[in-house]
Image (tube, rainbow, N blue to C red):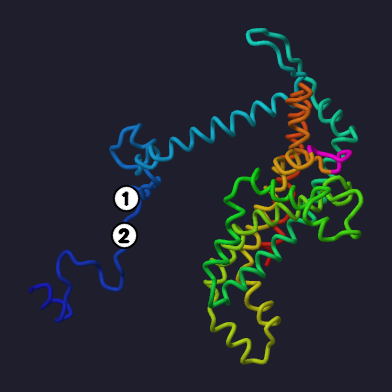
Amino acid sequence: MKSLRDSRDGTQAAGDPPRGRRPRPSTRHAPPAAAPERRIPGHRPGASRLERWLGNSPLGLVLTAPYTAYVLVVFIIPFGVGVWMAFHDYFFTAPGVSVPHPFVGFDNFTEVLGEEKTQRAFANLGLFMAINIPLTVVLALVLASALNAATHWRGFFRVAYYVPYVTASVATLAVWLFLFNGSGAVNNVLGPWAPDPSWLANKHLVMPLIAVYVTWKQLGFYILLYLAALQNVPKELHEAALTDGAGRWQAFRAVTLPAVRPVTSLVILLSIITAGQIFTEPFLLTGGGPSGASLTPALLVYQRGIEQGEPDAAAAIGLILVTGVLIIATVARRVMERD
């Protein structure tokens, strides 16, 4: 109270700083400020090393451990062995017999790429992709749009399109053999207009026929993907486009196609992967014939590795196939997801 009165009276109290000068904090001997502690994700103060390694959800690791072991044993280890075999002179031996497998570099790749059979197999795969992927995208989107707009029998058609996808390939291929063999139902209907030689023996028709078969078998799965995407498209956008004078095709192109673009990218990606794995259809329908017209890289891997006993050449073909599929899938994804 005395200091306050002295201040009001214009006198300086003892111990107050001089007037006209503001006190400056002394920084000469002040200790440096401590840096804020960085928080490491998943790190708990006082936790043991095992607890920090397991993280905040150790139960998640336990639940995913069986699938991790499955992927490791069924995919990762065989793929690593295949890569090793592709760069070595490898052949099968009797159990317990140890023989050297010298490193040969890219010799296996040079050998298989120079063979006409390998070139034919990859050309057939390119033809298969050129037919199967556009046909799958167009048919799946059109049929899904029709099912999305339908008010009656929607459940029946969903099941009808999905049945081939869940049916064993052996059963569905038997139906196609009944339809397209030399004395099949299709030739009986076409009569004199039937192709000669017949569908499965014609080197110009057999690969397109296999591409159409795979499209038909996989179509139900892709229709369900498109249906899920179409049901998330607001109907107000279609109504606004139609109110502004756009036709149904213009509204479909301006509203529906951009809305389902992520699903289209996924369908193309899955179709590319399916095409790279195609084996059962040419193996059961034609065995790769006639004259290699339906031979695919996956079937060629089986022939070279199992039937002819050349696992190193088969591994080289398989590695070329995996690399090509990865490149095509990456390019397609970048193109589809480009703004």
As helix, strand or loop, the secondary structure at mark 2 comes to loop
| 65 on left or right of 306 | left
- Identity of the residue furthest to the left in this view: 1
Q: Tell whether label 2 touches label 1 (CB within 8 Å).
A: yes
Residue type pointed to by label 2: Pro
Residue at 67 percent of width and 92 percent of height: 245
For the N terminus, the quadrant is bottom left
Residue type pointed to by label 1: Ala
Residue 286: give x, y in percent of width and height.
79, 41
As helix, strand or loop, the secondary structure at mark 1 comes to loop
Near mark 1 (Cα within 10 A), the count class, few <14, some 14-19 or many ≥20, is few
Q: Nearer the viewer, residue 91 or 20?
A: 91
Q: Nearer the viewer, residue 109 or 212?
A: 212
User: In the figure, 144 relative to 111: above or below?
Assistant: below
Q: Is residue 152 magenta?
A: no
Magenta residues (range): 287-293
For the C terminus, the quadrant is bottom right
Q: Nearer the viewer, residue 106 or 36?
A: 106
Residue 30 is tagged as 1
Residue 25 is tagged as 2
